[in-house]
Amino acid sequence: MNILVTGAAGFIGAHCVLRLLRDGHSVCGLDNFNGYYDPQLKHDRVAWVKDQVGEFPLARVDLTDAPAIDALFQLHRPDVVIHLAAQAGVRYSLENPRAYVDSNLTGFLNILESCRRHPVKHLIYASSSSVYGANQRTPYSVQDNVDHPLSLYAASKKANELMAHSYSHLFGIPCTGLRFFTVYGPWGRPDMSPIQFARAIAEGRVLQLFNHGEHQRDFTYIDDIIESIARLIERPPQATPHWDREQPDPATSPAPWRIYNIGGQHPVALRTYVALLEKHLGQTARIELLPLQPGDVLNTCADASDLARATGFQPRVELDDGLGRFIDWFLDYYALPIAHTPLAAELKRRSL
């Protein structure tokens, strides 16, 4: 297929482009290479992909530039759009809320409009586990109500689901929303906990754990995310026959629209998570326990049974294994010194 991937220089986007090219698809990427974090990491991700599969078209375009987005659709005529570009980060949404309106609302509208003017077979877009907000019952199910977001970031992702539904209903665009649960792995974002925590431990700095380390997170390894996307590409949603309007299912619709959770389904306490990082780094963390931060969700846990029924796949990489792979990449990419322990020596040997 001819596939457009937005956010192609991002963490999930780069892995997605690599997989799609390896599967024989024709891929066009879009990214604005903004400065939310060091753009060099984005350039290095693109170079990593090209080293393995060769050149691919990558447009430097901002989501808010509607004419440029439409011109890209006109030029490449994608069969499928995988929309991963967004302004990410829960805490940053407290500092710069307008960035989320620009990228996640206006930007997503521009993608939807181009999908309407240049009809596509399937629009797959990134949502987030953060939409579950104040919900306390776990595991989170796509059948749950998600009307109580705790951050503007979460609200923007819930808005994306609603916007996609309206375009699916009005214009027949098959839309699949994916609620990602704490994605980690090689080439991850530096504002996320794996790199932040690993750097603090490796450099001997104090590691701050909010909510006194009592959070639980459902970590999902990047390969599981990409496998899920790859399987969903050729499974565009169909309208649900006999959809019950008196007892509506929030995850399905009389329009060709679906929502899926993608999560590891095994939530881990942050203290356990830190202990695994200590193990793979061969160093002990210096920990400072702090109160809960505004906008943070206490616990996350995915019910991915709908995804398994639709694709025959559910996330399978265990956290210990996934963190080991992540640390191998982390030590190589950042070239940080690590402790002289048997484990550290083995990690260094494996990286050479």
Image (cartoon, rainbow, N blue to C red):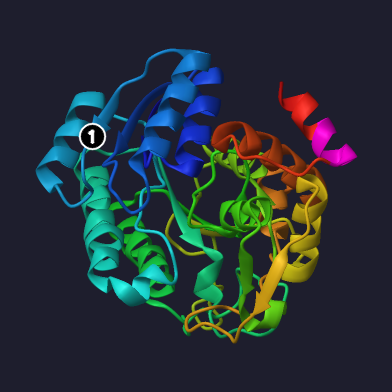
Q: Position of residue 133 (x, y in %)?
A: 53, 80
Q: Is residue 311 or residue 139 the one in the foreground?
A: 139
Residue 313 in view in this figure: no
The correct choice, above or below, for 340 with respect to 91 in the image is: above
Side of 153 relative to 351 (left or right):
left
> In the image as oriented, which residue stretches furthest toward the left?
67
Q: Position of residue 65 (x, y in %)?
A: 14, 47
Q: Which residue is mark 1?
A: 60
Tag 1: amino acid: Arg
Image quarter of residue 36: bottom left
Any magenta on residue 270? Answer: no
- At 75% from the left and 53% from the top, the residue drawn is 277
**Within 10 Å of the Cα at label 1, are there few (<14), some (14-19), or many (20+) other Cα atoms?**
some
Locate the N terminus by quadrant: top left
Q: Is residue 188 or residue 107 the one in the foreground?
A: 188
- At mark 1, the secondary structure is strand
Q: Position of residue 299 (x, y in %)?
A: 67, 76
- At 43% from the left and 64% from the top, the residue drawn is 89
The correct choice, above or below, for 285 with respect to 195 in the image is: below
Side of 183 relative to 256 (left or right):
right
- Magenta-tinted stretch: 341-346
Q: Is residue 170 or residue 228 the one in the foreground?
A: 228
Residue 98 in view in this figure: yes
Q: Is residue 138 or residue 141 the one in the foreground?
A: 138
- At 48% from the left and 80% from the top, the residue drawn is 295
> In the image as oriented, which residue stretches furthest toward the top?
54
Locate the C terminus by quadrant: top right
The correct choice, above or below, for 91 with respect to 255 in the image is: below
Q: Main secondary structure of the magenta part?
A: helix
Image quarter of residue 338: top right
Q: Position of residue 95 (x, y in %)?
A: 31, 74
